[in-house]
Image (spheres, coloured by chain):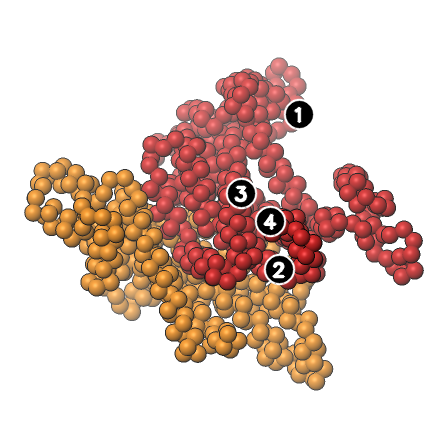
Chain colours: A orange, B red
Amino acid sequence: MLAYLIKRILWMIPTLIAISIMSFIIIQLPPGDYLTSLVASLAEEGSVDQSTLAGLEKRYGLNQPIYVQYWKWISGIILRGDFGQSFEWRRPVSELIWQRLGLTFVISLSTMLFIWLVSFPIGIYSAIRKYSVGDYIASFVGFIGLAIPNFLLALVLMYVSFKYFGQSVGGLFSPEFRNAAWSFAKVRDLIQHLWVPIVVIGTAGTAGLIRIMRANLLDELNKPYVLTARAKGLPETRMLLKYPVRLALNPFVSRVGWELPELVSGAAITAIVLSLPTTGPLLLNALISQDMYLAGSFILMLSVLTVIGTLLSDILLAWLDPRIRYR
Amino acid sequence: MKDNVDKNVANLATPEAGAAPVPADGPSLPTDEMDTRRAPKSSQVAGQWQLMWWKFRKHKVAVFCAYVILFIYAVAIFAEFLAPSVPGASQSRYTYAPPQALKFFGQSEEGFLPMYVNDYTVEVDPVALRRTFVIDPETKVPVRLFAKGEPYKFWGLIPLDRHLIGPAEKGQPFYLLGADRIGRDVLSRMIYGSRISMSIGLVGIVVSLFLGILLGGISGYFGGQVDNAIQRIIEFLRSIPTIPLWMGLAAAIPLTMPPLQVYFIITVILSLIGWTGLAREVRGRFFALKTEDFVTAARLDGNSELRVIMRHMVPSFASHIIAVVTLSIPAMILAETALSFLGIGLRPPVVSWGVLLQEAQNIRSVATAPWLFYPGVAVVITVLALNFLGDGLRDAADPYA
């Protein structure tokens, strides 16, 4: 297990480097560099301080070759936690991103939990009651769930609650908690608001996992060992949970790892529609106003955290399935 | 309709199978072992595509969805003629006019009306002083087929002004699915939007398919270090959350770029992730087939590597790839819709379903005009139909199902 763990973590390093290069390319993509736009905006206010400019130039290596700039940027992040300066907010990026990243991952992880809790029993039910009314309903709802884009579902939910319940479902906190410090009441308020984004983001994933669970279990149910277990008189429920479900669980767990990038994606776009205080809206704003250090940092950190999440699910899978760790 | 299909099958089948005529009721498995001594049964000599078609035909939902998809593509091809108006035509007199129902066989002062819609009356909200349109059942706007309307260029070439359906008199209100913020016909815009939304999926998939078959093929056929490297790249691309990455890339497209170029850049951005799934499929197939006897035989016969691949290996998994491709088109359509919806994909005046849904972004405008959701309905129907179709094709392509 330890050898597998170390190997898996080492494999992560090239991926992380590739991600950082990609984020840096995205930062560099828009025409005109950071300093030019900063000078332009400072000149608008009539105060171009040459020494500040020189300091910035030195800090980001702006007149040096691109790989030097990359090195300065990435070493700043790793060694000092310095993500650069947000040009629109006039504040260090690191001050802006952490809380939003945290909330994004609260949403993504609770959605993952939701997907598991819902799709696991429904998938099993669909498989053992194949072609029953319940199975057809689950399949139908699943197909619809896969076909409706996240943002459309969010819009429809908002429309329905606005039209028929006269309330708005946007946001993650009630107004009185929005700027309050963290407390027990605030957490409870968060949980009350959390279900809307969770359902919106989780629908597609739930639909996909139900189908996977059903297909896996159906494959297992036809195997001779199930017949043997039945023949020796094992109660049906116990037989199901002990053998076929246990085996069908492996693809289910590995699929969860693949699901995580999609969840983070879905969370980004849903957050924009529902105006949640997570990464989505700020990332979109930063991209539109070309506040590239902020946008790049978001993309970098979202990707890094996703890779770590995938790593955790791989470790879970290896723990669950010895065939993987001894390969 | 069923007879028609069967006839088509029979027509298709005879030259291809090249042997015994195909009975109209499809495959009939040999019930009696003795039977095989007589003329071979159709199911024994039928080619792979023939078998696949027979199996597919039995999947009623998938066949129905195939018709739906054909219909949507037909709409996209003949968009200019089918739309009652042109997408840019706005009538500010009819902002947020609600949908009119098409009615048949009415009477008016001038006589019998085969088709008509009701006109609107304007009511002014005394509190908000906002104008709202109400359908007035008293007035009738005559509607006819092949009506003269806004001039357009069919396929950008032939100047015409006839529309399949429209108000008998040009300029009369005709909003079957309502009007938007500046009085443009939602139905016409949706029909025009289908052209971009449906084609971006196809173009994107062609790019993905090219990359997927090339890299997946290399990976699967050669194996070893090359395979390892390509697999790492795929793993890397799949571990990044797609929407933030797409947003980052799409936001770098300059605002001044011409729409056609934006369209192609968006397609390339979407294919950047799309090829990975296809490459995995192709690689898996190559691995499975590499050691098959017929491949070894083909090689021992002195065929070149390329010929072995193109002539012997690819045809044996092409059907499977078609099914996978059908299943990945919806993802492309959804991605384009999402990007355009956020305002960083295609931009007006280009019309796609995503661009149209941008109008529905604001909860206030949706509350006054819920018909702005109709382009979303089109997206859902298309994606649903493509998913069922792809599922049917996959089941049909799988010899063990």
For label 3, count other residues whose C-alpha is less than 10 Å away and answer few (under 14), some (14-19) or many (20+): some
Please indicate, yes or no, whether residue A233 appears anywhere in the rendered image: yes
Amino acid carrying label 2: it is Lys
Q: Earlier in the sequence, mark 1 or mark 3?
A: 1
Q: Chain of mark 3?
A: B
Q: Local crowd at mark 4 within 10 Å, few (<14), some, or many (≥20)?
A: few
Type of the residue with mark 4: Leu
User: Alpha carbon of mark 1 to alpha carbon of mark 4: how far?
Assistant: 66 Å
Task: Write down the residue under mark 1.
Answer: B105
Circle 4 residue: B306
Amino acid tagged 3: Val
The residue lying at 42 percent from left, 39 percent from top is B265
Q: Indicate the secondary structure of the residue bearing disc 2.
A: helix
Dot 1 and dot 4 within a common chain: yes
Residue at 16% over, 53% down: A59
Q: Secondary structure at mark 3?
A: helix
Q: Tell me the CA gap for discs 4 and 3.
A: 21 Å
The foreground one among B387 and B326 is B326
Q: CA distance from mark 4 to mark 2?
A: 13 Å
Residue underneath mark 2? B290
Camera-near label (1 vs 3) is 3
- Mark 1 falls on what kind of element? strand
Quick one: label 4 or label 3, which is nearer the N terminus?
A: 3
